[in-house]
Every structure is written in structure tokens, then in C-alpha cells.
Image: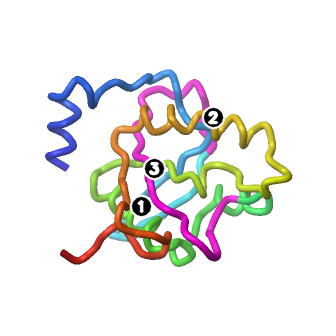
Amino acid sequence: RSWLSTCLEKHDMCNTHDNRFLPRRLLKVTLTNHRLGLKLCQIDPDMNDVQYLTLSYCWGEGYHFKLTPAKPDIFLKSIALSDLPQTLLDAVAITARLGYEYIWIDALCIMQTDAQAWSEEKLEDLRNMGKVCKNSECTIAALAAKFSDEGCFTSR
């Protein structure tokens, strides 16, 4: 937390956010009585000063837990942490430990449809991924994981 704070306060290159841009959706992370909670939030473009983290990771092969047209109402109420692959769960925990309320994870913030049915919304979200990352406070990079169930942490 102190390294991130120093970076954001003292390094000009780390503080180049366009506060006018926000992603369409973010995941809201709550910590109540040492219990993590997670839900999807539709972001109002008029919201100000929303600080969020992003996750960069490899999906890998196999089943992927993701936002689909059948799930938005469920995700807006709550996302069961037990359903998350380890990398996403680690990123949610890191977000809470760093004291942030929001994180953007592509699989859960961009509506995932099959390639033949890509909507205009998904195309716009994909075009904005660079802005999403550029305007986040920090990107959590799960560099060692080849699959989303391997987590953010490795043994040295």
C-alpha cells in the first residue's frame, strides 16, 4: 500500500488519469467483518473520482467464469466468491487489502458472448480497454499464471 501511495503521489507518469473516463461496469469489493463481498456495478458516467484497479491475466483454456447475458441481474446482487477462479479471487483480495472499492476484470465487466454474436456494446468495451487500464490507479498483473485458476502468487 505504501509503495503504491508513493508512486501515485511522487511519480508524474503514474498519475495521468483522465477522470472523465469510466468503464461501463466495475466490480464493487466490500469488506465487512473480515468477509469479502463482490457485486457488479453499472457505472454512471456522471460519477466523479471513482478510483479502481484493473487485473491483467491469462484466461487459459477450459471453463471461464464470466458475465453472460443470462447473468447480469444475478451479478448486480452478488457474485459468489466460491465461483471465482483463484486469480480473480486473489485480485479481489488485493483490491480490498489496498483499500480500494472497485476493480475492473474483463471477464466480469465486459458482456461475454460468442464470437458470432458480438454486440456493439462489447465492441465498444473492447475498444476502450486501453483507456480502462490507463485510467486505473494500478494494474494487478498475474504474470506467472498460465490459467485463471493458478492465482496471482507463486513460490519463490
Find numbered disc 1 in the image and state the secondary structure of the residue it sits on: helix
Q: Nearer the viewer, residue 12 or 53?
A: 12
Q: Position of residue 71 (x, y in %)?
A: 73, 62
* Closer-to-camera residue (20/153): 153
Principal secondary structure, stretch drawn in magenta: loop
Residue at the spot 72% in from the left edge and 43% down from the top edge:
122
Please tell me which residue is depicted at 59% across the width and 73% down the height of the picture.
Answer: 61
Real-space CA distance between mark 2 and mark 3, rounded to the nearest whole angstrom: 19 Å
In the rendered structure, which disc, 2 or 1, sits on the residue that comes first in sequence? 1
| Element under disc 3 | strand
Distance from the alpha carbon under mark 3 to that under mark 1: 7 Å
Task: Point out the tag, 3 or 1, that comes first from the N-terminus.
Answer: 1
Q: Position of residue 70 (x, y in %)?
A: 79, 62
Q: Residue at x 57, y 75 (%)?
A: 83
- Which label lies toward us, 2 or 1? 2
Q: Are marks 2 and 1 in contact (CB under 8 Å)?
A: no
Amino acid type, label 3: Ile
| Classed neighbour count for the residue bearing mark 2: other residues with Cα under 10 Å, few (<14), some (14–19), many (≥20) | few
Three-letter amino acid code at the position of disc 1: Val
**Where are the magenta residues, as a range?**
42-67
Find residue 155 and report its image quarter: bottom left
Question: Circle 2 sits in a helix, a strand or a loop, which is it?
Answer: helix
Query: Which image quadrant is residue 91 in?
Result: bottom left
Can residue 65 be found in the magenta stretch?
yes
Q: Which residue is mark 1?
A: 92
* Residue denoted by label 3: 103
Tell whether label 1 touches label 3 (CB within 8 Å).
yes
Q: Which mark is residue 127?
A: 2
